[in-house]
């Protein structure tokens, strides 16, 4: 069964600190893995998208890693800011049929405190 | 601003009623996706259209239907509404047909069924 699990469920950190969010998946056949940031009550915004051959991708202070062998990904946030408070969603795309199937994790809720 | 627009922003209606949600994709995007996000739940894929044709179906109820018009805007129709249909409904768009590229999400329509 295709599944995406994220940890931790929630996280509180102080402004300026770094943090790492985890995503484990059992999705086959794998197409790509995406990280989205979703502010409360707003639409998700894409941070990174990685294919099988990519193991690191950065977008400003956000760095995603992918280990396709262990089926794990992480999102590292450097020098956190108050505006980083949001839900971070890992989405894995499975190839197949007319359209790739997107399997969504339930997200990690990050709160950055001053 | 993702370039995807959704109307209305908020909708309050009663059980048994029917509503229509509207989405205009980013300029140049041919794919439109609809998602439902209930309180404290992850995003659930409902349906995808590509260039006017239904491309993929997810967990969409029979009471729900959608279409994509020649100008590429899309509408999601929800009928015989139940309390459990209260949720945020997001539309996303992308260029490619098979879900392999980045999806850009709209701001969402918050539906409240009383």
Image (cartoon, helix red, strand yellow):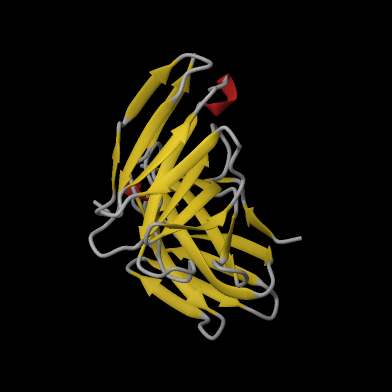
Query: Which residue is pictured at 62% across the width and 55% down the height?
Result: A6
Asked if residue A88 is positioned above or below residue A55 in the image, the reply reads above
Query: Which residue is pictured at 34% across the width and 63% down the height?
Result: B30
Q: Is residue B30 visible?
A: yes
Q: How many marks?
A: 0
Q: Position of residue A57 (x, y in %)?
A: 43, 76
| Residue situated furthest bottom in the rendering | A53
Asked if residue B15 is positioned above or below residue A107 in the image, the reply reads above
Asked if residue A74 is positioned above or below residue A50 in the image, the reply reads above
Asked if residue B83 is positioned above or below residue A32 in the image, the reply reads above
Q: Position of residue A87 (x, y in %)?
A: 47, 47
Q: Is residue B69 left or right of residue A51?
A: left
Query: Which residue is pictured at 37% across the width and 62% down the height?
Result: B51
| Residue situated furthest right in the rendering | A1
Quick one: A87 or B73, which is closer to the camera?
Answer: B73
Q: Position of residue B69 (x, y in %)?
A: 33, 50
Report which quarter residue A23 is drawn in.
bottom right
Quick one: B55 or A40, which is closer to the camera?
Answer: B55
Q: Position of residue A31 (x, y in %)?
A: 57, 75
Query: Which residue is pictured at 56% across the width and 68% down the height?
Result: A98
Q: Is residue A85 visible?
A: no
């Amino acid at each position: 069964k295709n599944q995406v699990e994220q940890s931790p469920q929630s996280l509180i950190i102080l402004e300026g600190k770094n943090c790492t969010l985890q995503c484990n998946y059992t999705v086959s056949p794998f197409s790509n893995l995406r990280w989205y940031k979703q502010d409360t009550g707003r639409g998700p915004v894409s941070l990174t998208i990685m294919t099988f051959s990519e193991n690191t991708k950065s977008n400003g202070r956000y760095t995603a890693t992918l280990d396709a062998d262990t089926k794990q990904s992480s999102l590292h946030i450097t020098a956190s800011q108050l505006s980083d408070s949001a839900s971070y969603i890992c989405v894995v795309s499975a190839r197949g049929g007319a359209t790739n199937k997107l399997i969504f994790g339930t997200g990690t809720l990050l709160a950055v405190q001053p | 601003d993702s370039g995807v627009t959704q109307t209305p922003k908020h909708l309050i209606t009663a059980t048994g009623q029917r509503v229509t949600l509207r989405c205009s994709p980013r300029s140049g995007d041919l794919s439109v996706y609809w998602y439902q996000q209930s309180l404290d739940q992850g995003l659930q894929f409902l349906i995808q259209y590509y260039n006017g044709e239904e491309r993929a179906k997810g967990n969409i109820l029979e009471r729900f239907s959608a279409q994509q018009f020649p100008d590429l805007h899309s509408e999601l129709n929800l009928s015989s509404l139940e309390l459990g249909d209260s949720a945020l409904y997001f539309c996303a768009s992308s260029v490619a047909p098979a879900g392999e590229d980045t999806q850009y999400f709209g701001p969402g329509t918050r539906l409240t069924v009383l």
